[in-house]
Image: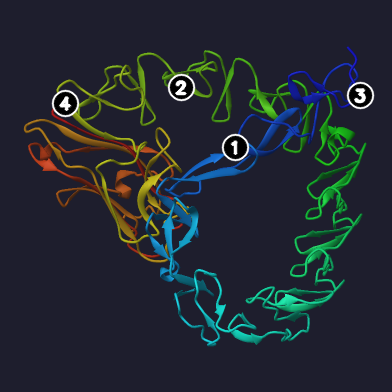
Amino acid sequence: MCHVEGQRAPKHACLGCVPRWSRTSWRPLFSEPCDDGDRCTRRDLCTNGKCAGAAYSCDDGLSCTSDSCDGKGGCAHVVASGWCLIDGACRKDGAAGLGGCGVCDSTRSARSWTLTSGGCLIGGTCYKKGALAPNGCGVCQPHKTTSAWTPLFSGICVIGNACVKKGAKHPGGCGVCDPTQSVNVWTVAGNACLINGTCVASGAKDVSGCQRCEPKQSQTAWSLAPDTCLVGGDCYKKGQSDATGCKVCDPQKSFVALSHKAGICHDNGKCYAVGTSHPTGCAACGLESAGAAWSILAGHCLIGGACYKTAYKDTSGCMRCDPAASATDWSAVAGTCKINGKCHAFGELEPGGCGVCDPTVAATSWSPLPGRCRINGVCRQAGDTDASGCATCAPSTSTTTWTAVSGASATTEGFEKGASGWTITNGQSSVGWGIDSQRAAAGKQSLRYGDPASGDYDNGARNSGIVDMPQVALTAGKKASLTFDLYMDTESSSKYDVLEVQVGGSTVWTKDVTQSVTMQKWISVVIDLSAHAGQTIQVRFSFDTMDSTYNSGEGVYIDNVNLMHGC
């Protein structure tokens, strides 16, 4: 079947007829508009045959709005019934504002104050009905206007805080007090403009040179001069290019943004003419890629600035160039797993025998084998118990954490849904304990001591914090133990950055060089609590920097906390 140049493939908006590259097959399109089907992306464009847009979020962080993407690159924020969203804040119906002149009335306006009867809001100040203006020639008369003074006498204007007689002229000569037109603003006279309180002659330009006074269009605002573009405060004449030479002022397309030049490709601020080859020889600037990046040649991949031919494999052997899947990124070799940078064949066992390479389940991690648990990075057989004997590997219950043995009780927390019942007390607001997703021994979240905003635990001073677990009543005469996963990126000295586990005010464990706490690596900590059997205890985690220096590490992470007892 014959297709014309530019025609798109059926059911694929980013493949088209591009005779320059192929006359017998569809070729990837570049920079053509498309729809990726995701309502929360915008500026959807074809890139190497795939449609993708820039993701964005519509969450405004306000409790009184329901947020959603509108599918057109914008957002919809619907204010809940009984609420107003005013000046970026949520306010309940009946809340007062504007110095007493306004009230939240969502039935009348959910996004602005509703003026109360009997008052005027003038210059940001609320005045009662009948109040006189400071100049003595105006009065608040809400039935006439609630936003300006009403003249006390006929034949005058009240402009700002000044009383102006009828016929009096603006200091610049372009305005006059004409109460028949307005009693609160100057009436512009003659062939001039009054912009921001300044008189401007007809045809005069602003400092950018792109805007000028056009009284026939507006006597109170600047008008854009014809055949110009005003971009970021800079004025460009029609046909004028920017510093890169890639973009040009084309008022017919946009007068507030520069447009891409026809027949030119741009990449990293540089321009290339159609037919120019990429330095790697892997791509070229073609007509279908004009205005965008490079058009990759058939049978090649352009990955990380390097050129590869079809079927070329990376150093791991697990990834290869497959233009049909992606011409800009590596594609997985069928039947392999790439785990920690190494390639493994289908069915290959993990060292330790806990997992197997099964790309149908996971291509970047080991898939668990039946009858095994991977707990704290160690492979366990079904039935294996922890040091206390209160917990066992029970794959049918969990393959990543200990399971309480029959008759034993367990209090566990993995922090995936926060830390219900835990109490956090930090000595300062900027740094301390909190739930964080930077690192986790399992799942996506852990308990962290640090500052997520800065990435460290340095606030310029000594800092500390404590976390208390819920109270637990230990069974009398039975064993009890506490286990948790720990990751520390702090000073290794036992005198500074002190981490302790306390029970009833007594320290039962502390970070100490003699206990071989390995920095920047997840380890498992096991603490015997059998001495507290028969007591109701509360476990506390405490961290104290002890000084204000060398606090640039990530801090402390705790995960998979298990308190087992009754066995």
Residue that numbered label 1 is attached to: 40
Q: Position of residue 134 (x, y in %)?
A: 51, 86
- Between disc 1 and disc 3, the foreground one is 1
3D distance between C-alphas at marks 4 and 3: 73 Å
Tell me whether the residue at label 4 lies in contact with that at label 3, contact meaning CB atoms closer than 8 angstroms: no
Indicate the amino acid at tag 1: Cys
Is 432 or 107 nearer to us in this picture?
Answer: 107
Q: Which residue is mark 3?
A: 19
Direction from residue 480 to residue 220 in the image, left or right: right
What residue type is disc 3 on? Answer: Pro
N-term-proximal mark, 1 vs 4 = 1
Label 3–label 2 contact, CB within 8 A: no
In this rendering, position of residue 16 left or right of residue 563: right
Q: Position of residue 97 (x, y in %)?
A: 42, 65
Label 1 residue SS: loop
Give me the residue at 37% from left, 36% from top.
Answer: 416
- The quadrant in which the N terminus is found is top right
Residue corresponding to mark 4: 408
Say above or below: 321 vs 162.
above
Q: Nearer the viewer, mark 2 or mark 1?
A: 1
CA–CA distance in space, label 2 to label 1 = 43 Å
Q: Quadrant of the image for the C terminus?
A: top left
* Residue found at x 60% / y 15%: 335
